[in-house]
Image: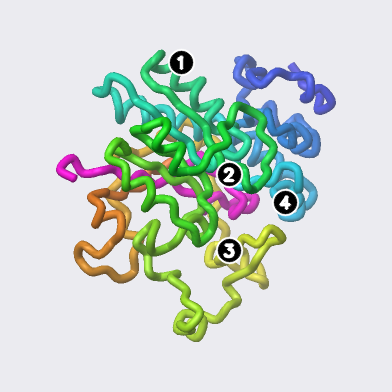
C-alpha cells in the first residue's frame, strides 16, 4: 500500500505501527520530509525517533532545517521528546522500583508538560497505580503549557509533593538545582536529562572541573581558545567539541535507525567519571551521599545535535546511598 505524502497529516499517531507489510523506514521513505517536519511542529504530537531522523536527514538543507526548527519562537526545542526514549525511561523506572509499593515522581522545570503527560500514560499502562507523577514549573520563562503543569517554586514543589524521584530535563546553563534535591531525605533519586555540557553547573551538578570557568581564570581559554564556544539567540552557550568543524572535515557519527529502535536504558552502566580532577569525598553529590551513573539510551535527540549525529543528550541518575 502506498501512502501519499499529502495524507500524513490525516494519519493517527499509531498508523506506522499498524502497517504490518512494510517497515517504518520503508513507509517513511515514501513521504516528503517537509510534510513530516510540518507534523513535528505540532507540539502535541509524539513523534518516533525514525520520523525525526528521516525528516531532517532527507531534507534539502538538513542543517538549515534543523536550526530553523529548534529555534522557533513559539516552541523552542531543547529535548526531542519521542516515543522510544519515553519507553526506555518508563522501563527503567518500572524495573528499578519493582520492589517498592508506591513511588511519587516530580518533574521540575517541566515547561509545557509534554514529558510528564506521556510518561504518566506509559507508567500507568506498565504498572497501574504504582506511580504518581506531577509536572511543576516556576513559569518564569513563560512557556505555553500544553498539559497540566503546576506553577510553583522548585523547593515548594518538593515540600508539597514529597517525591521519591525527581526528573529535570534541561536544567538551565550554569544553574544548579541538585543541591536542593539532595536536602530532602524523601528524594532517593534524581534524573537529569539533557546535554551535560550546557545543562546545570559543571562542578556543582556533575563534579566536573573541566569546564569550570571563572572570570579571573583564563587558563582554559589560553590553552584551547574560544573557537569552541558559540551562543544562540536565547543566550544558551554550547561547546563545539562534537560539532562540525568549519572546514567540514570532522567525521560524523551516524546512528543506524534500524539498530536503535529497541534500545533499552542500560541499568548496568558503570558510574561515569565526569570530573577531570578530584579529591576523595570532594564531589558535591558524593559528599551528600549520592552515586552517579549514566542511563544509556540510543534514543535521545536534542538541540545540540545535528542531522546524522545524535550524541549530545544524556541521562544521568543520581541515587542516594542506603546508609546516607
Residues at marks 3 and 1, CA–CA distance in whole angstroms: 38 Å
Q: Which residues are magenta?
A: 298-324
Q: Residue at x 30, y 27 (%)?
A: 97
Q: Is residue 76 above or below residue 6?
A: below
Which residue has dot 4 on it? Answer: 71
Cα distance in 3D space between marks 3 and 2: 15 Å
Which residue is depicted at the point 62% across and 51% down?
303
Q: Which mark is residue 317?
A: none
**Residue found at x 27% / y 68%:** 278
Q: Is residue 192 in view?
A: yes
Looking at the image, residue 120 sits to the left or right of residue 276; the answer is: right
Query: At numbered mark 3, what does the secondary structure look like: helix, strand or loop?
Result: strand
Question: Which badge, 4 or 1, comes first in the chain's sequence?
Answer: 4
Kindly check if marks 2 and 1 are in contact, taking CB atoms under 8 A apart as contact: no
Question: Residue 79, which numbered label?
Answer: 2
Q: Gap between marks 4 and 1, in whole Å?
A: 34 Å
Disc 4 element: loop
Q: In the image, residue 89 lies at what x, y percent?
A: 43, 33
Percent coordinates x, y for residue 257 in the rendering: 56, 38
Q: Determine whether label 4 and label 3 are within 8 Å by CB.
A: no
Cα gap from disc 2 to disc 4, whole angstroms = 12 Å
Label the magenta part by its dominant secondary structure.
loop
Which quadrant: the C terminus?
Answer: top left
Q: Is residue 275 above or below residue 11?
A: below
Image quarter in which the N terminus is found: top right
Circle 1 packing at 10 Å, graded few (<14), some (14-19), many (20+), is: few
Amino acid at each position: 500500500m502506498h501512502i501519499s505524502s499529502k495524507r500524513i497529516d490525516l494519519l493517527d499517531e499509531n498508523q506506522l505501527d499498524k502497517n504490518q507489510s512494510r517497515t517504518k523506514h520503508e513507509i517513511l521513505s515514501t513521504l516528503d520530509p517537509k510534510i513530516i517536519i510540518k507534523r513535528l511542529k505540532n507540539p502535541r504530537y509524539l513523534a518516533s525517533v525514525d520520523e525525526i531522523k528521516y525528516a531532517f536527514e532527507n531534507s534539502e538543507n538538513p542543517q538549515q532545517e534543523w536550526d530553523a526548527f529548534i529555534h522557533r519562537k513559539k516552541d523552542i526545542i531543547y529535548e526531542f521528546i519521542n516515543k522510544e526514549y519515553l519507553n526506555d525511561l518508563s522501563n527503567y523506572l518500572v524495573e528499578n522500583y519493582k520492589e517498592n509499593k508506591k513511588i511519587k515522581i516530580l518533574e521540575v522545570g517541566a515547561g509545557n508538560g509534554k514529558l510528564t503527560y506521556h510518561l504518566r500514560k506509559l507508567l500507568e499502562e506498565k504498572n497501574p497505580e504504582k506511580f504518581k507523577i506531577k509536572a511543576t514549573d516556576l513559569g518564569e520563562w513563560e512557556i505555553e503549557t500544553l498539559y497540566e503543569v503546576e506553577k510553583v517554586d522548585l523547593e515548594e514543589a518538593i515540600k508539597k509533593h514529597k517525591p521519591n524521584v525527581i526528573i529535570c530535563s534541561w536544567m538551565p546553563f550554569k544553574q544548579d538545582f541538585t543541591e536542593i534535591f539532595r536536602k530532602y531525605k524523601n528524594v532517593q533519586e534524581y534524573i537529569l536529562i539533557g546535554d551535560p555540557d550546557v545543562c546545570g553547573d559543571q562542578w556543582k551538578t556533575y563534579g566536573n572541573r573541566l569546564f569550570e570557568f571563572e572570570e579571573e581564570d583564563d587558563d582554559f581559554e589560553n590553552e584551547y581558545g574560544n573557537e569552541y564556544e558559540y551562543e544562540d539567540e536565547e543566550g544558551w552557550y554550547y561547546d563545539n567539541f562534537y560539532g562540525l568543524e568549519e572546514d567540514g572535515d570532522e567525521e560524523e557519527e551516524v546512528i543506524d535507525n534500524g539498530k536503535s529502535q529497541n534500545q533499552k536504558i542500560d541499568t548496568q552502566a558503570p558510574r561515569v567519571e565526569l570530573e577531570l580532577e578530584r579529591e576523595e569525598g570532594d564531589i558535591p553529590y558524593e559528599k551528600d551521599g549520592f552515586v552517579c551513573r549514566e542511563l544509556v539510551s540510543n534514543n535521545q535527540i536534542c538541540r545540540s545535535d545535528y542531522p546524522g549525529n545524535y550524541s549530545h543528550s544524556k541521562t544521568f541518575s543520581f541515587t542516594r546511598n542506603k546508609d546516607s
